[in-house]
Image: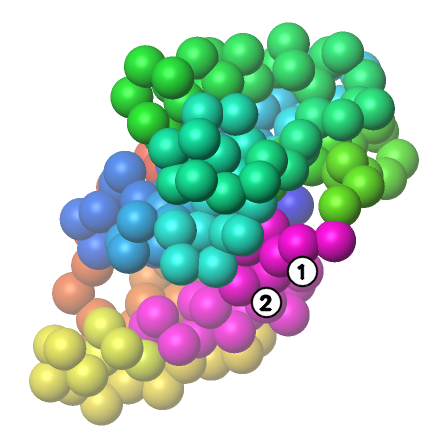
Amino acid sequence: MRRRWALCSALTAAQGRPDHCCARDRTWHYDDGGGNWADVRILDEGRAVLVGHDHEYSDTYYAGAAPYFGEPETDLLADTPAWWRDAIEDYLTDIERNGMWIGFVYGFDGGVWTRADYTVADGFESLALPTVTHEATARHLTEFLQHIARDQGISADVDPQAVAAAIAAGADVSEDQLRTLFGARQLDVAAGVAAARAFR
């Protein structure tokens, strides 16, 4: 996932939107630009915790969100390891302090992703995080680049081989690889490389 997230970060940074997808202080951030977000907190021993919210489709109401919206609470941390809570304690504090709602929490123990047991939609699938699979990332990059070409009024195809090569390079993507990927689009290649490097 690291390589895929790095490429999404490279693209948004090259477009001048570095805060939409980035790596800072062992946290990978993704923001879809519409108020929906996901963060991965990177831990030791190959572990990680994914936390986020889809303001339209997260039907889980955790902690302060339940009384605020008058909905039954879904305990996103029920029967989960203590290190999940420890990893996202600052997010939990922000629920009460800033009303930053959390719709889902997933933990990775080094082998598999899991979550608490509940049946309501938590918003993770609707968020359509573009870094979950190679195919999702390739599709996201292709559609993004097509949109940029239309905005810039140019005709520029997206080379699937360039997409695959850039994803494979991940945080080590080179300026030449991004130039090949971007083609005639006017984007900041250096900013893209710098954003990707933050995922090393």
Q: Is residue 108 visible?
A: yes
* Residue 163 image position (x, y, % from top left): 51, 68
Image quarter for residue 187?
bottom left
* Residue 145 image position (x, y, % from top left): 33, 72
Residue farthest to the right? Answer: 111
- Mark identifier at residue 75: none
Closer to us: 62 or 161:
62
Q: Residues within 10 Å of mark 2 (few under 14, many from 20)?
A: some
Residue appearing at x 12%, y 77% in the figure: 152
Cα separation, mark 2 vs mark 1, equals: 5 Å
Amino acid type shown at disc 1: Thr
Q: How many marks?
A: 2
> What are the residue bounds of the magenta stretch?
119-145
| Residue wearing tag 1 | 133
* Residue 100 image position (x, y, % from top left): 36, 30
Quadrant where the N terminus lies?
Answer: top right
Amino acid type shown at disc 2: Ala
* Position of residue 28 in the picture relative to residue 41 (left or right): left
| Residue wearing tag 2 | 136
